[in-house]
Amino acid sequence: MDPRILQQLRAITGDRGLITSPEQLKTYECDGLTNFRVLPDAVLLPSSTEQVQAIVRVCHDAGIPFVARGSGTGLSGGALPVKDGVVISTARMNRILEVDLPNTRMVVEPGVINLEVTERVAASGFFYAPDPSSQSVCSIGGNVAENAGGAHCLKYGFTTTHVLGLEVVLPNGSVAHLGGKSLDAPGYDLAGVFVGSEGTLGIATKVILRIVKRPECIHTLLAAFGSTMEAGAAVSDIIGAGMLPAAIEMMDNLAIQAAEAAVHANYPNCGGLLLVELDGPTAEVEALMQQVDAICRKCGATEIRVAQTDAERALVWKGRKAAFAAVGRISPNYIVQDGVIPRTALPRLMSEIERLGVEAGIRVANVFHAGDGNLHPLVLYDRRIEGQEHAAEVLANRILELCIEAGGSITGEHGVGEEKKMMMSKMFAEPDLETMQRVRCAFDPKQLANPTKVFPRPRLCGEQPGEYHPHPLELAGVAERF
Ligand SMILES: Cc1cc2nc3c(=O)[nH]c(=O)nc-3n(C[C@H](O)[C@H](O)[C@H](O)COP(=O)(O)OP(=O)(O)OC[C@H]3O[C@@H](n4cnc5c(N)ncnc54)[C@H](O)[C@@H]3O)c2cc1C
């Protein structure tokens, strides 16, 4: 990087807020998707909106691409640095600025960790509903950019439901306020546009969150089935009966084994395990629990347990939330997939994934948000065995194609990022992609904010629709990547 630019950046953040040594830069070369790596030219650690603004202005004037980074737990390569670019980390912007319980609002900086939001208001009987399994480490800024989900988003909604307003540094260095504390601000819903935009529209520097009153009663039930197909049928029937549990999660036997090895959650050893949580007024929860119990038994449940204490309930969730990482105990390498299907297709897709895994000689563990139809097949492989990585990647992509064919989506919550950008043209027609790219150009005409992500080929701003020429890789489809 031009030493004069570095000098300008150092003047903004001071020495402690600028990383340029190759050893330290390696920490930032990837996110949770570790098979993509790029070393950035520099990492900036601003501590205020003004510093973010000044950094982005330098980048804008010099034409330097920048990538925002929260905790780097993303699983689609969203925070992967861009060649010849800088990373802007929000790690030092980690203050809770305002807690307004009567109006159920909080204002936080983007580097605040998800779980800290709930921890701050728990004693007053409130919580922040979106609860990704990574909630003890991931940042609110990263959640906003990915529209993060979690077990309890089935009932309470994804991040977008709980982010009411944003302060954003736009890619030209100006500051905009999108949405606000009150509901349904007039004009375009630009906060809605920003949530899920994966760092391509600017950097969020303050976030207004909605918090929720803790329900009077919470019951968590574990139901053991012989197979994920049976468990999947129970999910469809529970929702079909008109109930909306707070969460319905599913784990197959491999995922159960991994979670048990890591956390000793005392799960039943079975082919398919459902965790069903109901919350609300006590009388209602108790009545609905009986219905859930009856549906599970009708669908073949061999054992049903209800957590009896808060500690038991916490252990049930600890096992579920540790399951992704725990899979490392049963396989040296694995791909975390993230697809969505209509709930009613669960039994069929579960059986199809099992068949494809057997055919490919690859084990697939399943642990996922079943109530949302948001699958997380974990495709297990050993990189040291020649050809296995390739076979795992082919299988992982075939699973996504199945999701599209079933009327679902290539991502439920992990985002498109670097990993799935070539899949976008399998899901969207060209006019749809063009419309999205025009939004991107309106925010970022110079294409400096997290460029090269999300779209198969970033549109050149100013280009007319008729001049759109798909990237050769886009035409060849995702298989070309491997
Ligand atoms: C074990 C494990 C379990 C997980 N479970 C879940 C789950 O249940 N649900 C779920 O949704 N995800 C899950 N994830 C994925 C990940 O934790 C989420 O995507 C999370 O929202 C990323 O937050 P982060 O702070 O780590 O963001 P990063 O990985 O640092 O960044 C993610 C994206 O956000 C952008 N970004 C970061 N900060 C800002 C900002 N201030 N302004 C604009 N853009 C920004 C980055 O450029 C990047 O595109 C899991 C990951 C792991 C490793």
Image: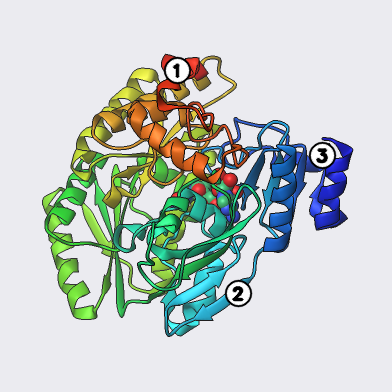
Q: Is residue 327 above or below residue 363?
A: below
Lower position in the chain sequence, tag 1 or tag 2: 2
Instruction: Indicate if the residue with disc 1 has its beta carbon within 8 Å of ligand 1.
Output: no
Name the residue beneath numbered marker 3.
23
Residue 182 place in picture, x, y as percent: 40, 73
Residue 151 place in picture, x, y as percent: 37, 57
Residue shown at 50%/68% (left/top)? 208
Residue shown at 24%/59% (left/top)? 304
Q: Is residue 73 above or below residue 421?
A: below
Q: What is the total number of numbered labels drawn onto the structure image?
A: 3
Q: Is residue 440 above or below residue 309?
A: above
Lower position in the chain sequence, tag 3 or tag 1: 3
Q: What number is the disc on residue 479?
A: 1
Identify the element where label 2 is drawn.
Answer: strand
Q: State the separation of the CA atoms marked 1 and 2.
A: 46 Å
Q: Is residue 39 above or below residue 144?
A: above
Q: Nearer the viewer, residue 345 or 63?
A: 63
Q: State the separation of the CA atoms marked 2 and 3.
A: 34 Å
Looking at the image, is mark 1 or mark 2 nearer the viewer? 2
Identify the element where label 1 is drawn.
Answer: helix
Q: What number is the disc on residue 272?
A: none
On screen, residue 459 versus residue 110, left or right, reads left
- Kind of residue at badge 3: Glu
Lower position in the chain sequence, tag 2 or tag 3: 3
Residue 462 place in picture, x, y as percent: 52, 31
Name the residue beneath numbered marker 2.
97
- Kind of residue at badge 2: Leu
On screen, residue 226 versus residue 333, left or right, reads left
Residue shown at 40%/22% (left/top)? 466
Q: State the separation of the CA atoms marked 3 and 1.
A: 33 Å
Asked if the residue under mark 1 is in contact with the one under mark 3, i.e. CB atoms within 8 Å, the reply is no
Q: Nearer the viewer, residue 201 or 313?
A: 201
